[in-house]
Image (cartoon, rainbow, N blue to C red):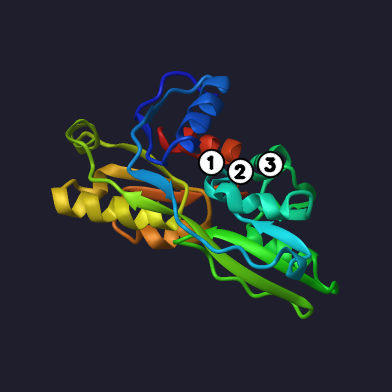
Amino acid sequence: MSGRLALSIFAIRPEPGLSVTRRAAQALGMEIIGVPLFEIGPLAWTPPDAGEVDAMLFGSANALRHGGPGLGAFSGKPAHVVGEATAQAARDAGFAVETVGAGGLQTVLDRLAGRELRLLRLAGEDHVSLDPPSGLTIITRIVYASSALPMPSDLERALRGGGVVMLHSAQAARHFRRECERLGIPLGRLRLAALGPRILDAAGKGWAAAGCAANPREGELLALGDQLCH
């Protein structure tokens, strides 16, 4: 990556994802200030009959981290997942990963078009709507929720001087904007690096600069953040 940065880069995603982002940044020679504005926790859920499920659908590793003992009934089933980090979490939990996406969960479904499958989707309370191709049936269970946290005073002070903020979800984009408006932090001093177009749209207008990664991968998001610093 480039040398001395003109602006600081902030990441606000919850743990353990925040630590993953910081390690990826360090590997690229970048410094990220990590302040989580969310906290993720499990929700009670009732698993369907395992015999009614052909395969699993995972849009986040959080579903595997917080799925609890209910996951055990489906161990060994094929899994179709949004990306490589989620794929590794699925393998660690005993699932046989068949499809790994690279551009959102809808693209994973599109790759399954023409098959007859009953998919169990374990998702968060705030999740993306999907349009399954003919032949695919999705059974959805909500197994975790992300709770927004108020912006701490040290982050507020830092952002008043400007900076680049990385956004990993639409929920994060909406909450971050609300907190800036609540605290009177000038949007025109901040630049946004979003993981995808839907996230960028959720952040709204009025920022000094804003862009989204060409592909929803951590490395490309970090590269965008680096560019926006100058």
Left or right, 159 with respect to 52, comes to left
**x and y, in percent, of residue 128 in the image:** 53, 65
**x and y, in percent, of residue 25 in the image:** 52, 26
The residue nearer to you, when weighing 170 against 97, is 97
Left or right, 57 with respect to 177, comes to right
Residue 65 in the image: above or below residue 154: below
Q: Give the class, few, some or many, for how many residues have Cα within 10 Å of label 3's Cα (few <14, many ≥20).
A: some
| Residue carrying label 3 | 93
| Residue carrying label 1 | 221
Q: In this view of the protein, can residue 60 be seen by the observer?
A: no
Residue flagged by tag 3: what amino acid is it?
Ala
**x and y, in percent, of residue 225 in the image:** 46, 37
Residue at 52% over, 49% down: 195
Question: Which quarter of the rendering shows the C terminus?
Answer: top left
In the rendered structure, are the residues bearing label 2 and label 1 in contact, judged by CB atoms less than 8 Å apart?
Answer: yes
Residue flagged by tag 2: what amino acid is it?
Arg
Secondary structure beneath label 3: loop
The residue nearer to you, when weighing 137 against 156, is 137
Residue flagged by tag 1: what amino acid is it?
Leu
Give the CA distance from mark 3 to mark 2. Answer: 23 Å
Give the CA distance from mark 1 to mark 3. Answer: 27 Å
Comes first in the chain, label 1 or label 3? 3
Give the CA distance from mark 2 to mark 1. Answer: 6 Å
Secondary structure beneath label 2: loop
Left or right, 105 with respect to 6, comes to right
Q: Quadrant of residue 70?
A: bottom right
| Residue carrying label 2 | 217
Comes first in the chain, label 3 or label 2? 3
Residue 34 in the image: above or below residue 148: above
Discs 1/3, front? 3
Q: Give the class, few, some or many, for how many residues have Cα within 10 Å of label 2's Cα (few <14, many ≥20).
A: some
Q: In this view of the protein, can residue 10 be seen by the observer?
A: yes
